[in-house]
Amino acid sequence: MLGRLRDGAVVLLLVLAAVFVLSAIVGDPAGVMAPTDASEEEIARIAHQLGTDRPLLTQAGDYFGGVVTGDLGESTWQNRPALDVIADALPATIRLTLAGIAVAALLGVTFGVLAGARPGSRLDRWANVVATVGLSVPTFWLGLLLIVVFAVQLRLVPTSGDTEWKSLILPAATVGFEHGGRIFQLVRSAVAEEVSKPYVLVARSRGLSHRGVVGRHVLRNSGMLILTTVGWEYVRLWGGAVFAVEVVFAWPGIGQTIITATDRQDFPVVQAGVIVAGAFVVLANLAVDVLYRVVDRRVQVA
Amino acid sequence: MRQESWSWRRGLLVVACLAMVAVACGGDDDDSSGGDTGGSGDDAEPLVIAVGTEPSTLDVQAVNDRNARVFTSNVFESMLGRDDEAEIVPVLAESYESVDDSHWQFQLRDDVTFHNGEPFDAAAAAFSINRIIDPAYETQRTSYIEGIVGAEAVDEYTVEIETDGPNATLPIQMTQIQMVPPEAGAQPDFGENPVGTGPYEFVEWQRGTKISARAYADYWGEAPEIGEFSVDVIPDAQTALSALQAGEVDLVLDILPEQRDLAPESVSVPATEFSYIAFNTHIPELEDPRVRVAMNLAIDKELIAETIYGGEAAPQPGQMLTEDMLGYNADLEAFPYDPDEARDLLADAGYPDGFAITLNVPIGRYSKLEEAAEVVAGQLAEVGIEAELNQLEWNTFREDGRIPGTEAGAMDLKFAWNSNEWFDASRIISHITCDGESSKYCNPEVDDLMAEAGATLDQDARDELYQEVWAILDENPHAIYMLQQNLIYGLSDRLEWTPRLDDEYLVSEMAFG
């Protein structure tokens, strides 16, 4: 357990360092923040206020020190602590990712098991097609399409924003369809492999129905893989869906915040966002590991 | 197995039926298919305006971008304003006059209160002006505070403003310096709790989502028809259009020409936005005015306006001004499309075989500029000028674009838009004078005329001087004068509104119909 925590901390540290180095390379935010007609003196003054004119080592020291104390700098765009900016947007993203992974797991696992239990059947083939489509279409395209069909044409749900409980439906569906595809593929192949094992034949010959075998034995043996797959997809969500889906659906979460902050070259907020997202990924990974251990007591954590 | 394929086929049938039902019920947006938003019955619902980016602050004096103005122009007011013909009219001030070359006095209304109860008087006006010109105060409105030294209250309702020498554009500046309350305006969180004198007062700001306001009960002027409104943040343009179609949003700024038919209603207005391609006159190829005139003749601006902008633009009349702007020269005309003449001029200037040059374009900043640039490059090639397109990310474009023409790395050709919400020819002074911040053009005649115009308060004299400047530029251009662009808005069915000429969005001028 401690080993896992230590690994997680190392990953987080690497993320922090990468963010800092990238921000330093990309350029001086002062030139961008200054009004179009600003003079050199004005730009220099803003750089001084931001602290970007200090030597890199000093800035790095402040940065890492700040992370430890929870001070991730001041948002140059909103003029309040960067961590607050991210913290305000975090709950919306958590809800989106949880809802999204729930839909993805529901679709992916259900169809994955159904298809895997009967490899080669028509259901299997059709489900494969649908899953591949889900994996291949661009997220924003799918989101926009869903909006046009279900919100504009059918008026069943709001087009965008986080105004009522129904607002979560389309964004979660978009995420679910995308990531459900991957989950489906992995679950299906795991189940198909299990089903082809000799013990299944033995159980069937003992009189157990196909459904019974799948339900009782196959699932339990593939359960580990299903769990890790879903967990891994949840982690991947934080790197992808969070951005495209939030922008398309005007969802007020971290993704949209980071994009706007990037556009305004608000480095503190971008850094804070990446750090928080990174921390979440590490946590999610840890949670999956713990769940894994709980579910299968045979697995020993080194 | 049998059981499985039966249920599978059935499922497919069910899905197909649902899909057909969905498509059938969808149909035209214009059928009031009983959605619970939009429709003319819901006048009680607040008006919603969609913007692409959330404002960084609601402190009106700090920022100048349109996303903030959409909200703050309804909550704050200035001493002067503009009517629907863009003429300057009194708002919080009843009258004004220039006392001497560097002093102006404004007589204020005596019946105005701020939304928090603080009275609006000369002390508040002076506070507001001194607040924004204070060097320690960060503002993007730098051009509006230039030349203003300070303000003080002469009596309860008279405020005197001191300028740095004669400043004929002070009234214009006073249309864009908003009045803020002395007590609330001194608080550090004023940007999150804006308080003004306008017809609407701030209610709430849900970060990342929306900013809402309601009509102010003790407003000094006419009560607005619409009781509440909100400015909603919808980053994706297509989503905003969908929201408009679904009746969730009443106004979307900046829709593309080809989206006009998709919106329930749309309206376009010739904006004070002028696209241009600035020359770096310091490079050998562009030194000769004949070359620059040739390049103006080589571009078919009508074609670009028709095909790329769908008619939502018009060639500039030989100057980056419209008829109602001070300095407009009615004798000038747009450069005609004449590639033969262009080739002749180029040959005369010593470039019978043309030359190579780079055309710099920002990405994703101005509507369809990238496409327009490709047409421009093609047309320049017809007269022998090989223009290489260089697309840059906006921040880089802005920085590189300001490298002086005599230094390495300066842009040969810079394609951008310029807005002139001042309705005054002096607005582009920094583009056409020898030491202008955005200028790569140096013509002593122009410099002298601009300086003379800046030193007088006589508006007629200024008008004549600026007309002369443009007459000179007609023969010795600082840019390829492209198009006056339209701004296109998407409106919901229930919104009744005529866009203003000055790119302001006043909910008090809107109504539900």
Image (tube, rainbow, N blue to C red):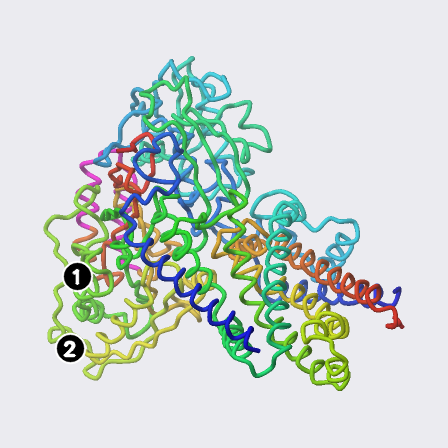
Q: Earlier in the sequence, mark 2 or mark 1?
A: 2
Residue A49 seen in this snapshot: no
Q: Which mark is residue B435?
A: none
In the picture, the quarter occupied by the N terminus of chain B is bottom right
**Amino acid identity at mark 2:** Arg
> Is residue B397 a member of the stretch shown in magenta?
no
Residue name at image x 23 percent, y 52 percent: B320
Same-subunit check for callouts 2 and 1: yes
Q: From which residue to which does the magenta span run? A: B442-468
Residue name at image x 67 percent, y 48 percent: A83
**Amino acid identity at mark 1:** Glu
Quadrant in which residue B364 is drawn = bottom left
Q: Which residue is mark 1?
A: B475
- Look at the magenta stretch and give its main secondary structure: helix
Quadrant in which residue B435 is drawn = bottom left
Local secondary structure at mark 1: helix
Image location (x, y in percent) of residue A87: 66, 47
Q: Is residue B42 above or below residue B218?
A: below
Nearer-the-camera pick, B345 or A249: A249
Identify the subunit bearing mark 2: B
**A131 left or right, relative to B404:** right
Q: Is residue B472 above or below residue B250?
A: below
Q: Which mark is residue B343?
A: 2
Image location (x, y in percent) of residue B451: 29, 45
